[in-house]
Image (spheres, rainbow, N blue to C red):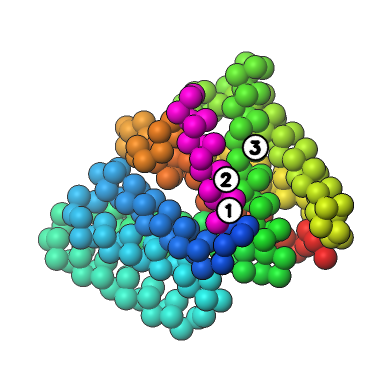
Amino acid sequence: MKSRLFVAAIGVPLVAVIILFLPTIVTAVMVALLCAIAAYELTFATHLIEKKRIVAETGIMAALVPFWCWAGSPALPAMAAAVIFFLILAAELLASKMELSFEAMTACLFGGLISPYFLSAIVRLVVQDNGRFLVVVPILVAFVADGFALFAGMAFGKHKLAPVISPKKTVEGMIGGFAGAVIFMVLYGLILQFAFHKEVSYLSAVAAALCGAVVSVIGDLFFSCLKREKHIKDFGKLLPGHGGVLDRFDSMYFCAPVCELLLLFLPLVA
């Protein structure tokens, strides 16, 4: 627990400074680094891919996606990169003489294209009008829901949420996470309204809190399923007390794009 809190005490302020105060390209660099590490964890650390060349190819593709989002998501470069990456994987599959499985290639596509696009919702949000305020939403919801779920589960947890997938998660913890996300999003709305003089939609704030908290749990359980299937405790050891990037940001992969979609239909600030 001490190492977990120590990493959070350093990491949270660092991420806040990068996202809220530095140029948006720095946010893209940060997300690209996270995506590349996550691609490594998803492929090599799970033993789905043993060849480091393929892991590197997947990591490079994953790192390019946030920069594409930062540049405005132009269609032509996306199509070209996706086609080239697909052809590279097809060539690797054929050259392996049936040593590589279709499951492994699917993991490369997920790790190199799909999951980076989801996490890059952070980049797409920060470059929008009022982006510095919007990008806080998925980060706040995901981490607050996770923190409140942890402490509520420790204090009140009696009913297992998914005992086979994640034995420590409880229904009471999940409810505590939902409540914490709603409370903090309302408080965040009040800060935007009175400190920054923004017109705030509290309906959007509560909707983002609830939807984001729900999909955060789904994201956590989704990656937990993969760990159980591959018989590993953590995806990595990069963050003491947390595990790897996928262990720490698993909920963000689902929360960020859902909050992005919701904020497009229900704007938070005006």
Question: In the image, what residue occupies the spot 71% across and 58% down?
Answer: 133
| SS state under label 1 | helix
Name the kind of residue labelled 1 in the image. Val
Question: In the image, what residue occupies the spot 81% across and 49% down?
Answer: 191
Name the kind of residue labelled 2 in the image. Pro
Q: From the viewer's perspective, tell me whether residue 249 is left or right of residue 62.
A: right
Question: In the image, what residue occupies the spot 56% across and 67% down?
Answer: 23
Q: Which residues are magenta?
A: 1-18
Question: In the image, what residue occupies the spot 71% across and 39% down?
Answer: 181
How many angstroms separate mark 2 from mark 3 (CA)? 18 Å
Circles 1 and 2: CB atoms closer than 8 Å: yes
- Mark earlier in primary sequence (2, 3): 2
Q: From the viewer's perspective, tell me whether residue 190 is left or right of residue 210.
A: right
Label 2, on which residue?
13
Q: What is the magenta segment's predominant secondary structure?
A: helix
Residue 84: percent from left, percent from top: 32, 76
Residue 209: percent from left, percent from top: 72, 45
**Mark 2 packing: few (<14 Cα in 10 Å), some, or many (20+)?**
few
Q: From the viewer's perspective, tell me whether residue 37 is left or right of residue 222.
A: left
| SS state under label 2 | helix
Name the one closer to the observer, 50 or 4: 4
Circles 2 and 3: CB atoms closer than 8 Å: no
Q: Nearer the viewer, mark 2 or mark 3?
A: 2
Name the kind of residue labelled 3 in the image. Ala
Q: How many marks?
A: 3
Residue 12 lies within the magenta run: yes
Residue 36: percent from left, percent from top: 37, 57
Label 3, on which residue?
145
Label 1, on which residue?
17
How many angstroms separate mark 1 from mark 3 (CA)? 21 Å
Where, by quadrant of the figure, is residue 79 drawn? Answer: bottom left
